[in-house]
Amino acid sequence: MHFLTVQKYFEKFRRDLALHADEQYQLNSHRVTEYDEYLYLAKSLNIQNSKDKLQHFLTLAYDGKVYNIMMPKTKHSLLLEDEEEEDDKLLLKYLTFNKIAKISKAQNTITRFWDYFEEFILQYKGVSDEQFVFYLKEAEWRFNFHREEQNNNSVGYKG
């Protein structure tokens, strides 16, 4: 197969996963029990030099599954150039320490997903901002599917 054929297939697959995840969330939104914000930056990047690459999303959990909502990119202020560096430090501090969250314990479905996502995304050597949400949705789907599979196997399901 040609590279572009495979690439188009996976782009369609990821878009379909995003639509499926949204449908599932709409059916289960009333069951959300935990939520937390996450700031993601590829491990190979330095946060001081790559603030524009920072991805910000909200993770919601229900019944051992997760659903992620991409948050809008933060805009750089219109301050003068020499004040911009200080402004960026304040923004990072704000985003790190002022989060919305409702979690019941330190190790939970959401943190397990984030650990899973960090490993999942490493196999892709860089993802564009435009495509990031689709990779996030693929990781979400795989995480949820794997959890569902484990639950089915734990009650003796052989499918």
Image (spheres, helix red, strand yellow):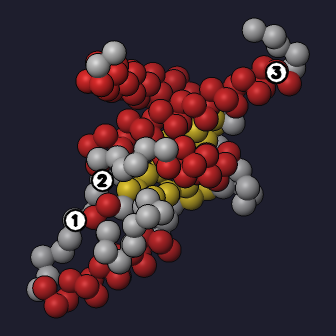
Residue highlighted by disc 3: 153
Q: Nearer the viewer, residue 121 or 22?
A: 121
The type of residue carrying mark 2 is Pro
Judged from the image, the secondary structure of the residue bearing numbered disc 3 is: helix
Q: Which mark is residue 75?
A: 1
State left or right for residue 10 relative to residue 4: right
Q: Residue at x 77, y 27 (%)?
A: 150
- Answer above or below: position of 100 versus 146: below
Q: Residue at x 88, y 16 (%)?
A: 156
State left or right for residue 71 relative to residue 66: left
Alpha-carbon span between mark 3 and mark 1: 46 Å
Query: Nearer the N terminus, badge 3 or badge 1?
Result: 1
**Residue located farthest toward the front when viewing the structure as drawn:** 1
- Answer above or below: position of 137 versus 101: above
> Do the residues under discs 3 and 2 have CB atoms within 8 angstroms?
no
Q: Give the percent coordinates (x, y) of residue 60.
A: 55, 44
Q: Nearer the viewer, residue 156 or 124?
A: 124
Residue highlighted by disc 2: 72
Image quarter of residue 66 = top right
> Do the residues under discs 3 and 1 have CB atoms within 8 angstroms?
no
Q: Give the percent coordinates (x, y) of residue 47.
A: 39, 73
The type of residue carrying mark 3 is Asn
Q: Give the percent coordinates (x, y) of residue 98.
A: 47, 71
Q: Residue at x 57, y 31 (%)?
A: 142
Q: Nearer the viewer, residue 124 or 78?
A: 124
